[in-house]
Image (tube, coloured by chain):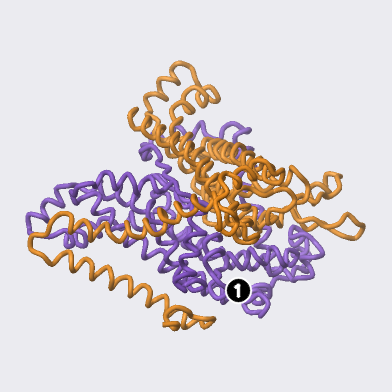
Chain colours: A orange, B purple
Amino acid sequence: MDWLLNAGDDPAHKFLLMIIAIVLFVAVMALILFVVDKPRNPSKWFIAGGFVGPALLLLAAGLLYPAIGTIVNSFQRRNSSEFVGFDNYARAFSDPAFLLVLGNTALWVLVAPALATFIGLVYAVVVDHSRFEKFAKALVFLPMAISMVGASIIWRFVYEYKPDQPGIEQTGLLNQLIVWLGGSPVQFLLERPGNTFLLMVVLIWIQTGFSMTLLSASIRAIPTDIVEAARLDGLSGFGMFWRITIPSIRPALVVVLTTIAMTTLKVFDIVRTMTAGRYGTSVVANEFYEQSFRQNNAGLGAALAVLLFIIVIPVIIYNVRQMRLAEEVR
Amino acid sequence: MSTTQPAVAPKAVPVPSSVADRSRKAKKALTSPWASTLAVVIAVIWTVPTFGLLVTSFRPELDIRRSGWWTVFGDAFAGEGVFSLRNYESALFDSSTNLIDYFVNSFVITLPAVFIPISVALLAAYAFAWIDFKGRDFLFVAVFALQIVPIQITLIPLLSAYVDTGINGTFWPIWLSHSMFALPLAIFLLHNFMKDIPASLVEAARVDGAGHVKIFFQVMLPLLTPAIAAFGIFQFLWVWNDLLVALVMGGTNTFPLTVRVAEMAGSRGGDWHVLSAGAFISMIVPLIVFLALQRYFVRGLLAGSVKG
């Protein structure tokens, strides 16, 4: 049994386990489908159960049950021994350290999605139909394939600092630029509140490709007769952009903004890799990890997770509303 | 870190503009020098950081400590530039970093964690789209709504369930968790694609006496290949690049590249020779997959979803 569970550090064993997992899964699914297909005149429920059953089972076990568990946990003491009412939430909203975390998260959500959307939009408009369009878009698009961990390392190297002494050269690009311009190097990641913004740069850098792709597609979907009519009315350049393009793609803009906002809310990897939440850069998702798995404070961790959940809800409702509106217009 | 986002782009599928249209617009695009400058500035900011780290990963350790990567161009011109694969070698095989082991883990985690949820979701999406059973709409809305559950909220109870069953620290909880977290988005997305398949095809197969299982395999699956590819890339990028799930659910023998590289950034933050090489080792596979299947990825994005 242990052989099936644990591969230790033997690569061959790991690969074998991987194949076994897949074969096992295929066998189970095949059995279910075989059983479902067997009867001559099966009831609809029976068939549907075979098709939807595995998914519903996994969802119930993997999302529903644990989510309820966490909500209950958030009202309990750190080791889940007794109920403490709203104490965990009260702490999250009163302890200055946590207020900083909440403030940082708010800052992230306000700034990062807006900038990523804006830059993506501008870039989409500027390179649209240019000779290098494909190549230019690929450059901005590529960071989407890079993990947040990888992107954080890329940017940490840009922010790298070497002490300001004769004979020592800066190896971080940003500090070198400052030195070239006659300034003295800065320990970027240590200085509040600038460091939070420098962390946001990483997320913006990743997400701009997303906003560019979606917005570019919706700009192209603007009916040509509208553009033509506006042109006859003498609109061009910035006027065209402001009066025709922006209103036409408003629904797409909202979707992009809210989607990035949701990603931003849960940003963990970047903070973890860049500063591990030190120097006043922590956010809710990072603090959740810290409290739950480092400080063994499950109650507080659960409260933070629930908080994350509650903040997401209005964003999503707004998003779904906009989607509906967008569909009605069409 | 997010599980899923029901970000459904308005169904604004790009209409390819006609050739004449294109050339007319091409005249005005990039004509303003401001616009061109802006485009170049953005493109540079989006490329130079990656390029800098890439160059660094081929430089000798001492050079990296002493001078910036931009100096290599002057050096190369003077015939002094030294490039080697030494950093990659030590990042992959030195006993202190040993990234090759973590590479294996990343691979072993990713394959089942992409295959399993897609298969389960395909079946469920088929039922939601083409089997008319009671309570279908309610269940579908429920699954759709589950997209808003952040994975953070599930981690602690899931982990203690894994500990209770004794499978924690192995690959199984990671495969399971990724499969479960992927389902709401996968079902929703694949359902949308499946709905678009003409009912007449399904009807024809049914008249020929095909049952649901046969219709699923012989009518649906072949037509859904692009949709599967689209979601497959999402899921692949998500699993390969994931840090949180692997960190929480895994153990020393299962940690993937992301966990190890993030850990190195903390403990060996100044060792840029291994960090730079390590970062690119962790990025190479997703970059290749992404570039090869970009077409499907864009289609998936436009069809209404992204995972962050």
Helix, strand, or loop for circle 1? helix
Residue ranking furthest to the right? A166
Relative to A76, is A59 on the left or the right? left
In percent of width and height, residue A293 lies at 60, 61
Residue A117 occupies which quadrant of the picture? Answer: top right
Q: Nearer the viewer, residue B111 or A179?
A: B111
Q: Is residue A204 visible?
A: no
Q: Nearer the viewer, residue A161 or A103?
A: A103
Relative to A114, is B304 on the left or the right? left
Compared to B248, does A230 lie above or below?
A: above
In percent of width and height, residue A142 lies at 54, 53
- Residue displayed at 64% across by 39% down: A107
Image quarter of the N terminus of chain A: bottom left
In percent of width and height, residue A13 lies at 46, 82
Residue B6 occupies which quadrant of the picture? Answer: top left
- Residue displayed at 39% across by 50% down: B300
- Residue displayed at 74% across by 60% down: B69
Compared to B251, does B204 lie above or below?
A: above
Relative to A109, is B133 on the left or the right? left
Q: Nearer the viewer, residue B86 or A256?
A: A256
Query: Which residue in the structure is indicated by mark 1?
Result: B99
**Disc 1 sits on a residue from what chain?**
B
Residue A152 occupies which quadrant of the picture? Answer: bottom right
Image quarter of the C terminus of chain A: top left
Amino acid found under the numbered disc labelled 1: Leu
Compared to A37, does A90 lie above or below?
A: above
